[in-house]
Amino acid sequence: MNKIYFSIVFLLFGCLVPGEFKNVFDPKSISGLLLASVGNAGAFECKEKSNTKSFGNIDQVLLQCNRELASLDTSFLADLNEQTFSNISFTKIGNDQLLIQFDPITTDGCYEVNLSSVVSGLGETLSESKYPIIVDTQLPTVSLVSYLPITDYTFFTARYWDFESSEPLNQFGLPSISGKLAPFIVFRSIQKISDTKFRVYFETNFKSNEPGSITFSFPNATDKALNVVTNTITIRLIGLVAGPYLNFGRSEFDAFQNQNGDVIAIYGYNSSAEILRRGSNSFQLTNPSLPEIHRGERGVMLDGKRLLITGGIKFSVATSLTESYIFDTETTAFTQSGSMVEPRHMHDIVKLPNGKVMVIGGIRDFTPANPSLYFTTLNTAEIYDPSTETFTQLSNRLKTPRSFSCSVVLNDGRVMIIGGTDGIFAPKDTTEFFDPNTETFSWGPSLPTPVGALKCLKLSDGNVLIYGAQLSNLSNATMLYDVSKNRILTVANSLYRREWSFALELPDGGVLFYGGAYRYNTSEPSRMIEKLDYAKSNSFYEMGMSRISVSKHSGVKFSDGTFLFLGGESGGLFNHGTDYYGLIE
């Protein structure tokens, strides 16, 4: 007979899931009880001889009875148990032992042998006519398989976790929790989805947005062999940690990373540059007296170490700058490069697949005349060649003048130019494409909402997220350019107004929105961090509060998926602070 590894336990209370068998005998006859009470001490019973639970080569059970057994109808016993055991047989050994043999059972669980027809020589029926056989080849484990991703830091919000076991469970009770965040979690209920999957609903009331952990253990979960789940699961939630202070507050600027992972903060209402070297805990001021650029400059990394800065405008000067500069982020040398053909600020800048740089549109000059500003918006673009450090203006023009727009290089090499304005209160609902091969412009799909002073984020799937617009008729719309369908749609409305916000893609595919104002130049930006559950529910979720209200800031994403947000404005004042997001406990 084949052998199988399993263990056997006989429990007086039987299996937790009793079998359904018909007993043709009176289970407790009056005559049997009288005879037992007169002739013997205790009830008539049979127990497993070794009376231990152990793993071993067992395909048979030997029962030791405390009475002499009457003649057994072994065929009837086999028929009685045939629904549960294959090829089961019963053999009387000596006067008081019963050998039960059967084909190996390969599925773990609690099984019952029905001994309803077994009687003693005095005609007694067994005190327990069903005996449990526990077959167990593995210990159960539980894993966390479905939950709002690890980057979620939800506040005052109902959520759930889905747990899955390695085998069917007989019972799944509320897990116990420990860890820094455990005091702020309240369990509500459990939903059984299947024998192996259970959903636990809970609420959170986190007091901060710092990193923390939760460890789950499962003392109230057992498999059908009555083994307790012994493994634990630890979830580490990322959070917000204060970073080093900038030497100067900066607003409306871009932060950059070089090939070493150093972070460069340059210009942004301050004519200086500073670098946070990888592994360092402070920003080092590199060139405290760069050429004056008040605001509106644009920059792009040329390669792993050189940063190109173009245009901008000086303080109280009506005409934009034509100058460009190269900042070596390793040596911190700052040298003048070629000049643009036209003066520009508030323009777009992108690095093309061939290594050249394109500057697009922007403002040539402006007049701060009451009651409103007046400025001249450009419909021209130029190409910068790093090898010659020269700019060449394209002969073809943009389809429409654009400033306060955003541009991104698509995976096919085309440049997509989105929205913008040709007058400070005239946001556009148009887009266009630039083909570097033909150096021509063509119309793109229309925006659902006119937007100016916006931002673009190319996602890992090649689509483009459009967000953070100020000149948007007070819309909360977050839009998406779907490359495969060549259309733009409103993917979701953020829970809060987020002009001048900053968004970065999370490791789980979601998008984190940090900061942002209710209206241009407002002193009331949003402190609530939000996450767009992109390509899943496409809903926004609250992700906790930032340390301060901030807008017009910048940020970078490190190779390990963590973020650093820098500068900006808070309450109308420049912010010197930085915040890491994505660190774990």
Image (cartoon, rainbow, N blue to C red):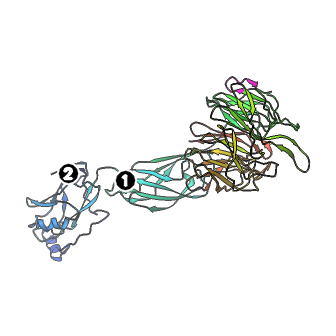
- Does residue 502 appear in the picture of this structure? no
> Could you tell me which secondary element the residue under label 2 belongs to?
loop
Is 328 part of what is drawn in magenta?
A: yes
Q: Which residue is mark 1?
A: 228
In the image, farthest residue toward the bottom? 30
Magenta span = 327-337
Q: Specify the label residue 236 is tagged with.
A: none
Label 2 is placed on what type of residue? Ile
Label 1 is placed on what type of residue? Val
Q: Report x, y in % for residue 359.
A: 73, 37
Which mark is first along the chain, 2 or 1?
2
Q: Which residue is mark 2?
A: 58
Q: Report x, y in % for residue 154.
A: 60, 53
Could you classify mark 2 by the number of other residues whose Cα lies within 10 Å: few (under 14), some (14-19), or many (20 or more)?
some
Q: Report x, y in % for residue 273.
A: 74, 30
Name the residue located 18 percent from the left edge and 69 percent from the top edge: 116
Name the residue located 92 percent from the left edge and 49 percent from the top edge: 370
Could you classify mark 1 by the number of other residues whose Cα lies within 10 Å: few (under 14), some (14-19), or many (20 or more)?
some
**Frontmost residue, 379 versus 425:** 379
Q: Nearer the viewer, mark 1 or mark 2?
A: 2
- Name the quadrant containing residue 26: bottom left
Name the residue located 12 percent from the left edge and 69 percent from the top edge: 39
